[in-house]
Amino acid sequence: MLDIETLKSKLIELFHLEEVHVEDLSDDAALFQDGLGLDSVDAIELTIFLDNEYGIVFNSMAETETAFASIRKLLEYINEHGEL
């Protein structure tokens, strides 16, 4: 089972957020807009990462939107659907 601190570390590394530390990120921080500030290109990169790292392939846009709502929602999705 993946824990929230590990996921935050992976996101920081994946998106090269050098100025951000794990403790700076709220568990409920949005991945896009006012949260981490990710954009549509980052969404593609995150989707590829989830496939490569956890074998997650989204079946619909609604599923993706739910998983990408916040760091906590992404963690829940990974733990429920990923190959850990």
Image: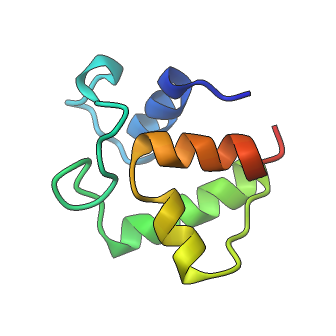
Q: Residue 8: x, y in percent?
A: 44, 32
For this orientation, the residue located farthest to the bottom is 60
Q: Is residue 10 above or below residue 53?
A: above
Camera-nearest residue between 64 and 6: 64
Pick out the residue farthest to the left. Answer: 34
Q: In this view, does 58 lie to the left or right of 33?
A: right
Residue 72: give x, y in percent of width and height. 46, 39
Residue 4 placement (x, y as % from top left): 51, 27
For the point 60% across and 42% down, the residue is: 76
Residue 26, compared with residue 43, is above or below; it is above
Work out whether residue 72 or residue 54 is closer to the camera in this orientation and state it. Answer: 72
Q: Quadrant of the N terminus?
A: top right
Closer to us: 56 or 61:
61
* Outermost residue toward the right in this view: 83
Q: Which residue is drawn at 23% across and 48% down?
A: 35
Q: In this view, does 38 lie above or below 54?
A: below
Residue drawn at x 22%, y 55% as measured from the top left: 37
Residue 34: x and y, percent? Answer: 16, 54
Classify residue 43 as left or right of residue 75. left
* Placement of the C terminus among the 4 image quadrants: top right
Q: In this view, does 56 lie to the left or right of 68?
A: right
